[in-house]
Amino acid sequence: MKLLLATRNAHKLREVGRVLDGIEIDSLGEDVQLPPEDGATYAANALGKARAAARATRRLVVADDSGIEAAALGGRPGVHSARYAGETAGDAENLALLIEQAPAGSPLAYVCVIALVDGGDGRERLFSGRCAGRMAAAPRGERGFGYDPVFMPDDVGDGRTMAELSDEHKDAISHRGRALRRMAEALRPTTG
């Protein structure tokens, strides 16, 4: 099976490739224009990207939108996680703002919604994943990206952040990993 991943984010491409081992993943070409992520929900953003790429390529397309939700901030930054510190902000600025605003030890959740759109028949499906955790007192770890240095997943329980976990460990518990495995299960051919 071959899927087109509607992103140009190298981190996501590597992560999806690891989790969907055995499924060939193609990256999005520069010739495909994706809409801005200005939807009110993760699903709206993921579907917008997947639909645009499926229309342009007539292929089976996967797109995701994900974010971090801080309970102390009423669920923010949420769908605005990639632009939390401003439209041109990068990971470092977004992380710094979350550190400034969310207290250490407060609940966090990573959320991901994956849209699968068939460019041939137009069929659409959504898959979601969630990973609960807590805010670290200070950033730790060199792995991962985005908010990983301050996200201590509840599934680990020893205080390590996502940025301190191996790729395999992170993929097993992450919001994106969970959503991708749900999608892979739905794509698995049934025998009978």
Image (cartoon, grey):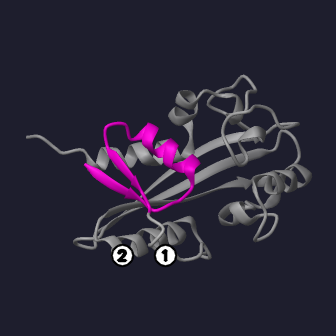
Disc 2 and disc 1 in contact, CB within 8 angstroms? yes
Residue 26 is a magenta residue: yes
Q: Which residue corresponds to mark 1?
A: 33
Quick one: label 2 or label 1, which is nearer the N terminus?
Answer: 1
Which contiguous range is marked in magenta?
1-28
Residue 105 at x, y = what percent? Answer: 83, 39
Residue depicted at 56% across the width and 28% down the height: 169
One can see residue 96 in this view: yes
Residue 146 at x, y = what percent? Answer: 71, 49
Q: Which residue corresponds to mark 2?
A: 56
Kind of residue sitting beneath label 1: Gln
Residue 29 at x, y = what percent? Answer: 44, 64
- Residue 138 lies, with reference to residue 101, above or below; the image says above
- Residue 2 lies, with reference to residue 17, above or below; the image says below
One can see residue 153 in this view: no
Examine the image and state in which quarter residue 27 appears. bottom left
Residue 166 at x, y = what percent? Answer: 60, 27
Residue depicted at 58% across the width and 69% down the height: 41
